[in-house]
Image (cartoon, rainbow, N blue to C red):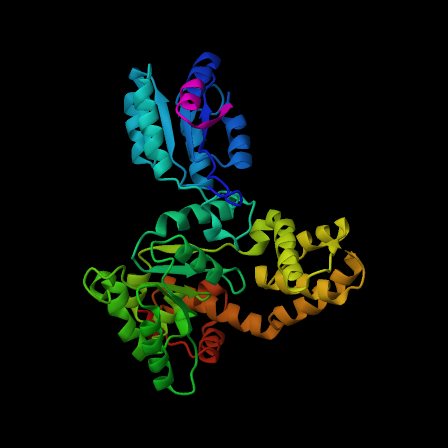
């Protein structure tokens, strides 16, 4: 290993038990087995450690005072369903443990446990829970996805596990959340990392033939790599037909037999595809083929703890393009950024940070400059009020007609509008109740 390389982090295991002797014994066995160990004497303590240290697997006793193993698993599974949980149980509670595995628990061990079996089960769990830490030697794949939030941590765990697959993937999320960055990370972590990553921007074209030609060129350029279709909801119907075989049977379209992995399709959308299907703009069979595996990228307001890290990351990247210029952000400036609404999400944060770095002449960027930039940027990012109201009306009416299967009388009653007014609303949005029956 060269001096510049970083060794992969030793897997950390969280062990939870209110019996201090057993807790110490398990910790010693795991440490001797080559693991780092975090110990917790209660479920509440375990939750704090889990959020702070992000272990690769959790071992918990079933019967504990306060929060027992069932309750702890429910809390952990709600926050990070991809992290394996192993439950320790006495002989009399084996039925409880078996029931727990049906709810998503990775496995269970009976007490007194066998040391070799413990290490074997932990090894299996760790193999299913790959490291996603940016500091690890093998984690350059997610270098552009900076985070400290459990929400993005869980997304990255899922992405890392999906990287080895040839199956199509649908990535959803608002504009500016980083869908393309996630797709690039998945490609970088996959066996096709040395193959091309090709981006095709879908959308209204001057001529449908242009998009057909673009799709053909993209397939040819991908050559066993990853094809990323941005705004797939806007893909022309004729191209949707051509795309369908590639996502239904990806293994059939490898360039040559035994010539390497087939093309993997990752599609992204910021719009609900079910609405596009109802409007007749998107094929239902293509949606179901893409949606077999889906990842949802959270918005920046859902992961505010990442904002200081992102500011540092964007500042460093800006500094690489502008060598010799060193600038930082005042504490009140960082606080302002953490409280901002961010309708444009990570993309908007990057724009604001780079604008601030480029416009200031001082070493420390003050909150006053950021306040002005945020005001100007939010005006560009925010939808006009009339447009937002129109979009809400349309979505509300569609959901209402879907729920009532096109029954106008029921829909009008739920909306608290008379039928004449309700029909005017439907006409304004070109909605036909019969289409929902």
Q: How many marks?
A: 0
* Residue 52 left/right relative to 286: right
**Is 242 contained in the magenta span?**
no
Specify the segment rendered in magenta.
28-39
Quadrant position of residue 186: bottom left
241, 397: nearer the viewer:
241
Looking at the image, which residue is at 30% across and 23% down? 117
Q: Residue 155: give x, y in percent of width and height.
A: 45, 49
Residue, far left: 257
The image position of residue 205, as x and y in percent, is 42, 83
Residue 106 in view, yes or no: no
Q: Is residue 263 above or below residue 77?
A: below
Is 124 above or below relative to 289? above
In the image, 403 versus 266, the foreground residue is 266
Snapshot quadrant of residue 23: top left
Lateral position of residue 163 relative to residue 391, left or right: left
Q: Residue at x 36, y 26 (%)?
A: 87
In the image, what residue occupies the spot 53% across and 55% down? Answer: 144
Q: Is residue 424 left or right of residue 381?
A: left
Q: Farthest residue toward the top? A: 21
Q: Does the stretch in magenta take in 36?
A: yes
Using the image as rendered, state which of residue 163 and residue 44 is in the foreground: 163
Q: Is residue 380 visible?
A: yes
Q: Position of residue 9 (x, y in %)?
A: 47, 37
Q: Quadrant of the C terminus?
A: bottom left
Q: Residue furthest front?
A: 2
Give the image quarter of residue 216: bottom left
């Amino acid at each position: 290993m060269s001096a510049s390389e970083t060794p992969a982090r030793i897997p950390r295991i969280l062990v939870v038990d209110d019996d201090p002797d057993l807790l110490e014994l398990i910790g010693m066995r795991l440490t001797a087995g080559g693991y780092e160990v975090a110990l917790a004497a209660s479920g509440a303590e375990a939750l704090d450690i889990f959020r702070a240290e992000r272990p690769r697997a959790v071992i918990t006793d079933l019967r504990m005072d306060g929060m027992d193993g069932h309750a702890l698993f429910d809390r952990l599974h709600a926050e990070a369903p991809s992290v394996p949980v192993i439950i320790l149980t006495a002989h009399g509670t084996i039925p409880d443990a078996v029931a727990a595995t049906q709810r998503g628990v990775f496995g269970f061990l009976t007490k007194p446990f066998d040391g070799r079996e413990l290490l074997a089960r932990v090894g299996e769990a760790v193999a299913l829970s790959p490291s996603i830490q940016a500091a690890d030697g093998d984690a350059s794949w997610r270098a552009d996805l900076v985070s400290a939030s459990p929400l993005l941590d869980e997304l990255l765990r899922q992405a890392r596990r999906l990287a080895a697959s040839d199956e199509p993937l649908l990535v959803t999320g608002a504009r500016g959340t980083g869908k393309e960055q996630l797709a690039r990370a998945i490609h970088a972590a996959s066996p096709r990392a040395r193959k091309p990553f090709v981006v095709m921007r879908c959308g209204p074209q001057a001529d449908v033939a242009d998009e057909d030609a673009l799709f053909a060129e993209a397939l040819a350029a991908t050559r066993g790599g990853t094809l990323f279709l941005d705004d797939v909801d806007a893909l022309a119907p004729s191209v949707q037909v051509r795309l369908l075989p590639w996502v239904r049977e990806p293994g059939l379209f490898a360039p040559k037999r035994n010539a390497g992995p087939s093309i993997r399709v990752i599609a992204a959308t910021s719009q609900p595809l079910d609405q596009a299907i109802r409007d007749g703009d998107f094929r239902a069979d293509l949606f179901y083929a893409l949606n077999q595996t889906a990842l949802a990228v959270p918005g920046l307001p859902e992961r505010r703890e990442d904002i200081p890290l992102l500011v540092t990351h964007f500042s460093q990247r800006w500094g690489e393009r502008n060598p010799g210029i060193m600038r930082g952000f005042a504490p009140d400036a960082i606080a302002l950024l953490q409280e901002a609404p961010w309708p444009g999400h990570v993309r908007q944060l990057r724009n604001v940070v780079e604008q601030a770095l480029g416009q200031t002449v001082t070493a420390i960027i003050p909150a006053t400059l950021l306040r002005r930039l945020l005001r100007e940027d939010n005006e560009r990012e925010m939808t006009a009020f009339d447009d937002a109201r129109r979009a809400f009306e349309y979505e509300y009416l569609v959901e209402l007609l879907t729920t009532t299967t096109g029954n106008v009388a029921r829909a009008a009653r739920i909306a608290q509008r008379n039928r004449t007014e309700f029909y005017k609303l439907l006409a304004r949005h070109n909605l036909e109740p019969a289409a929902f029956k």
